[in-house]
Image (cartoon, coloured by chain):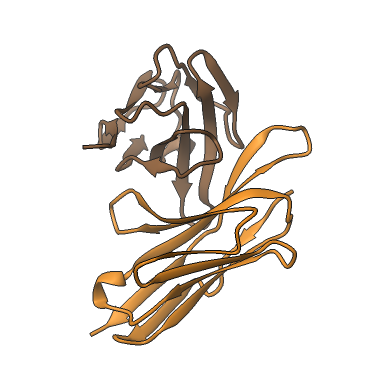
Chain colours: A orange, B brown
Amino acid sequence: KQEVTQIPAALSVPEGENLVLNCSFTDSAIYNLQWFRQDPGKGLTSLLLIQSSQREQTSGRLNASLDKSSGRSTLYIAASQPGDSATYLCAVKHMNSGGYQKVTFGTGTKLQVIP
Amino acid sequence: EAQVTQNPRYLITVTGKKLTVTCSQNMNHEYMSWYRQDPGLGLRQIYYSMNVEVTDKGDVPEGYKVSRKEKRNFPLILESPSPNQTSLYFCASSPDWDTEAFFGQGTRLTVV
């Protein structure tokens, strides 16, 4: 069974710091991995999608990497800003043992960027 | 504007009273899905649909029904809601199942 873990559960950093959020998954047979941010009371906003054949994706100050063999993805945020404060979620798309497509989410890292 | 729209945003209902949460997308996406989000458990997939008239169970389908009669709409039906279905619900869509997913704003459901 695929399990997705995000550590730490919460993180507080001063503004301007570069930071790394981690996402680990137990089954490397994934189709893709997607990073989201979720603001309180809001829906999920897609940040980056990495297909299984890719190693990384970049968008502005965000860079996500994927290492399937080790079951890890990292989200790098450069020069953090208070507006980056949110909960960050990763999700993997995969097939289960029965051949059915599944989406498994991590429980998220709650980030606070202090001005 | 490209978006996924859920209604209602907030709903309080009583045990056993049938309800429907609507989801509509204007991006002509083929893949749509429903999730529930609970503290400590994260988001879990309830049902998904690959295309019109094609639906399948996710991880937690018990107590829910869905239908996909047209491409843009994917309603979630609770025939007889129970308090353990109190949760935050999200609808999502994507062009295909392995492409970028877009989420609605969520529906907070309370069953008393």
Q: Which residue is drawn at 33% across and 30% down?
A: B27
The x and y percentages for residue B112 are 36, 34
Is B21 drawn above or below residue B105 in the view shown? Answer: above
Quadrant of the rendered structure where residue B102 is? top left
- Label total for image: 0
Residue B88 visible: no
Residue A84 visible: yes
Apparent side of residue A83 relative to residue A6 in the rendered image (left or right): left
Quadrant of the rendered structure where residue B77 is? top left
The x and y percentages for residue B53 are 51, 13
Q: Residue at x 23, y 85 (%)?
A: A115
Q: Residue at x 39, y 14 (%)?
A: B70
Q: Residue at x 29, y 28 (%)?
A: B26
Apparent side of residue B4 relative to residue B76 in the rendered image (left or right): left
The x and y percentages for residue B96 are 51, 33
The x and y percentages for residue B97 are 54, 35
In this rendered view, identify the residue nearer to me: B112 or A11. A11
